[in-house]
Image (spheres, rainbow, N blue to C red):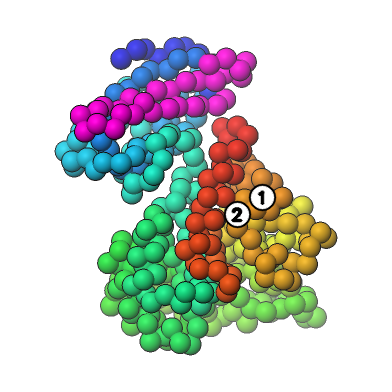
């Protein structure tokens, strides 16, 4: 194994994987360091020691350099054939030791297979298995059953769901939970509340966030609007506190959905009421008109953010965003998408990211695939993400 050069702090880390399709092939991970001068420098070459892997390995490398530390996550994806568990484990241990000795500390874990054969520098909360699938139940044009929905999500590599429902779905709550468990999925969040959920929380040992909102189009004409909002939310705050669940305040337009309002409610709850289980669920599809201030809004909301749901974003002056086809767009299809992605990456936000269907005219699988494809493209095309 070659020694690491004493080059400059990496401004851009690129890598590739040499791959064969025979069952006896071994896979080579090669790094190159593009310095601020635009010159490529050779970094160590590591033999993964994996035979025909089909797993995806996410590796977080903390690189110590003279100018500080740089954290880089590599997603190693290889095509095709399934390795034995022994080969996979041995290869991971070897890689962790090799990179750890040369660069610092390494954390690695395996993920479901993908069709690509590449290595990406990527932020962990944007990886498919960490994304939250949202608005995928009543909006699905295929009207899938719980088991069919769970199988579809598993097929896409998604592992976490924010569950929205209508009255016809109440009888299916337990079946939904069971289908998720059978397919290795997590019920990450549940829309608002229904008393039918209470016994299921204990029976199945689940702890979903509860997402709710209070409709307040205009600032209320009262002495203390924030305290007034807290009073209106008090039942949900008390319920979720008793159950040990997070409560997410969901922006749904109007004064009650403004970042300043949401932050003020969360701050007041912590500082005056001693309540720290209430946070913010921010949805870009309800914030087309707020893109100009999104970087500042995100920084203000960041301490309280429980989830950030992304969307294809357009200028509300250029199209009617009250129309569903303009308001709800696949990630990567909006002219302002690079703007919000840059703001998220620059902010250092590492919390959950959601993608959504929310289109009655679309098969949810099609909608989610479009979002996954658009997000991958945005990340690939994003300028230097190392900061």
Residue drawn at (64%, 61%), measured in percent from left and top? 329
Q: Is residue 352 visible?
A: no
The answer to whether mark 2 and mark 1 are in CB contact below 8 A is: yes
Residue 232 falls inside the magenta stretch: no
Residue 382: horizontal and vertical position, in percent?
61, 38
How many residues crowd around disc 1 within 10 Å: few (fewer than 14), some, or many (20 or more)?
A: many
Which quarter of the figure has residue 144? bottom left
| Quadrant showing the C terminus | top right
Residues drawn in magenta: 11-40
Apparent side of residue 226 relative to residue 164 in the rendered image (left or right): right
Q: Is residue 310 visible?
A: yes
- Is residue 43 depicted above or below 76 in this figure? above
The label on residue 197 is none
Q: What residue is disc 2 on?
A: 331
Residue 28 falls inside the magenta stretch: yes
Secondary structure under tag 2 reads loop
Q: Earlier in the sequence, mark 2 or mark 1?
A: 2
- Is residue 55 depicted above or below 143 in this figure? above
Residue 260: horizontal and vertical position, in percent?
71, 62
The label on residue 337 is 1
Secondary structure under tag 1 reads helix
Q: Foreground: 143 or 230? A: 143
Q: CA distance from mark 2 to mark 1?
A: 7 Å
């Amino acid at each position: 194994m070659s020694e690491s050069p004493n080059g400059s702090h990496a401004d851009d880390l690129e890598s590739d994987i040499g791959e064969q399709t025979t069952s006896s092939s071994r896979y080579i991970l090669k790094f190159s360091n593009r310095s601020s001068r635009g010159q490529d420098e050779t970094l160590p070459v590591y033999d993964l020691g994996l035979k025909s892997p089909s797993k995806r390995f996410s590796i977080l490398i903390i690189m110590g350099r003279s100018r500080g530390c740089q954290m880089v996550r590599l997603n190693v994806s290889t095509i095709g054939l399934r390795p034995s568990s022994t080969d996979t484990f041995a290869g991971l241990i070897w890689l962790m030791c090799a990179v750890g000795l040369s660069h610092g500390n390494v954390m690695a874990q395996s993920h479901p297979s993908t069709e690509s054969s590449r290595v990406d520098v990527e932020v962990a909360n944007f990886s498919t298995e960490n994304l939250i699938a949202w608005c995928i139940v009543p909006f699905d044009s295929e009207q899938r059953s719980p088991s069919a929905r769970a199988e579809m999500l598993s097929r896409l590599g998604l592992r976490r769901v924010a569950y929205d429902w209508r009255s016809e779905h109440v009888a299916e709550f337990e079946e939904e939970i069971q289908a998720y468990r059978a397919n290795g999925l997590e019920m990450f969040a549940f829309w608002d509340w229904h008393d039918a959920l209470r016994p299921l929380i204990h029976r199945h040992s689940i702890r979903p966030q509860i997402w709710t909102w209070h409709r307040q189009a205009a600032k209320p004409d009262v002495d203390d609007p924030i305290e007034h909002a807290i009073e209106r939310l008090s039942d949900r705050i008390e319920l979720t506190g008793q159950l040990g669940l997070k409560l997410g305040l969901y922006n749904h337009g109007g004064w009650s959905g403004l970042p300043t309002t949401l932050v003020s409610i969360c701050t007041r709850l912590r500082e005056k009421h001693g309540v720290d289980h209430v946070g913010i669920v921010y949805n870009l599809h309800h914030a087309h008109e707020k893109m100009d201030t999104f970087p500042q809004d995100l920084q203000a909301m960041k301490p309280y953010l429980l989830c950030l749901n992304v969307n294809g974003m357009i200028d509300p002056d250029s199209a009617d965003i009250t129309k569903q086809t303009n308001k709800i767009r696949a990630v990567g299809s909006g002219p302002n998408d690079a703007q919000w992605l840059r703001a998220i990456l620059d902010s250092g936000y590492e919390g959950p990211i959601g993608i959504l269907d929310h289109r009655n005219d679309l098969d949810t699988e099609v909608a989610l695939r479009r979002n996954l494809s658009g997000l991958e493209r945005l990340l690939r095309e994003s300028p230097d993400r190392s900061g």
